[in-house]
Amino acid sequence: MSRFQFPDAPGDLIGAHISTKGGLHTVFGRAAEINASALALFAKNSNQWKGKELTDADVTLFQELRTVRPIVTHASYLINLATTNAEFHRKSIAAMIDELDRAERLGAHGVVLHPGAHMGAGIDAGLEQIARSLDQIHAALPNHKVVTLLETAAGQGSCLGCSFEELGRIIELVDDKQRIGVCVDTCHIFAAGYEIRTRDGYERTIDELEKHVGIENVGVFHINDSKKPLGSRVDRHQHIGDGEIGLDAFRFLLNDERFRGIPKLLETPKPVEHESDRKNLTLLRSLVN
């Protein structure tokens, strides 16, 4: 069982990554529109190093309007803890400290982070640098409870974390393992070569997850179908059931008792706000026994 479970939280903990247009507090109105019982959000602009100041008034309003308990934030796409560029690395450290601090103040349980890309330095060097970077970040925030959830990667370029073994090695190398977990993205693991469409394939994949990462370290799932085929190493999300994964994999996951109480969040395309999320969430809930 995962140490990140929310056994007493209301609802099925199925939700989506939700827009914060108009302010962070607006996510709860949008969550109600799609009947989400868990959610993810960006606590700052995802494509900038520094975000708008998060004031005490912002935090108070967010907490006053909060209707959803399990919340994760997603770190800026710019952050790369494995980079070989010293200035870029310094900025990444500072940005991740800020992300974790924002999440702590908002009462989120985790910050989802893309592990990073080694930029030619090699897998071993990249994994070691990520771990040492996380140690540095943790040292800067000694009293924070919020955890970093390392997201599975699709395997493009020199990106790290496309295998459960790589994620497990980062956890192994980090000093304070209680502050680290993983985010499993169904599209990404499928693109990385994990077969989840059949019962046997799904069980083998979860066995690999247990072996290298540990079920107890799974903090959240991103639930996405894939536009690209198995092992493509291309990250292209698709609506549930409309991609190469199909419905069975999601049925297996949603009914897996080992992951009961773990948030499962959509990151599927949103051509029209709410409409796509409602359709995908309704379909997902129809798969729950």
Image: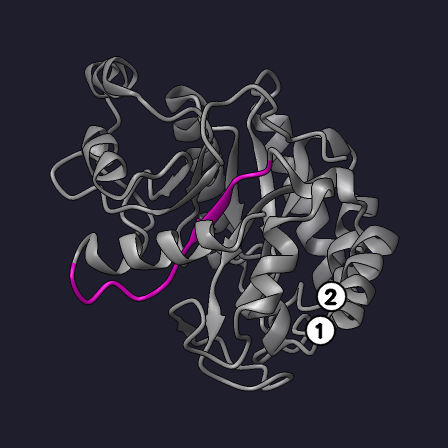
Q: Is residue 259 visible?
A: yes
Q: Which mark is residue 198?
A: 1
Report the side of 168 relative to 11 (left or right).
Answer: right
What is the span of residues highlighted in magenta in the rendered image?
A: 262-272
Residue at (57, 79) in percent of width and height: 156
Q: Is residue 155 visible?
A: no
Residue at (40, 20) in percent of width and height: 105
Q: Is residue 67 magenta?
A: no
Q: Are marks 1 and 2 in contact (CB under 8 Å)?
A: yes
Q: Is residue 237 above or below residue 63?
A: below
Outermost residue on the right side: it is: 211
**Quarter holding residue 167:** bottom right
Q: Nearer the viewer, residue 282 or 276?
A: 282
Quadrant, the N terminus: top right
Q: Residues within 10 Å of mark 1 (few under 14, many from 20)?
A: few
Residue 54 coordinates in the image, percent (x, y): 26, 26
Main SS category, magenta section: loop
Q: Nearer the viewer, residue 77 or 135?
A: 77
Task: Say what amino acid the circle numbered 1 marks.
Answer: Thr
Q: Is residue 211 above or below residue 238?
A: above
Q: Is residue 269 magenta?
A: yes
Residue that badge 2 annotates = 202
Q: Nearer the viewer, residue 273 or 287?
A: 287
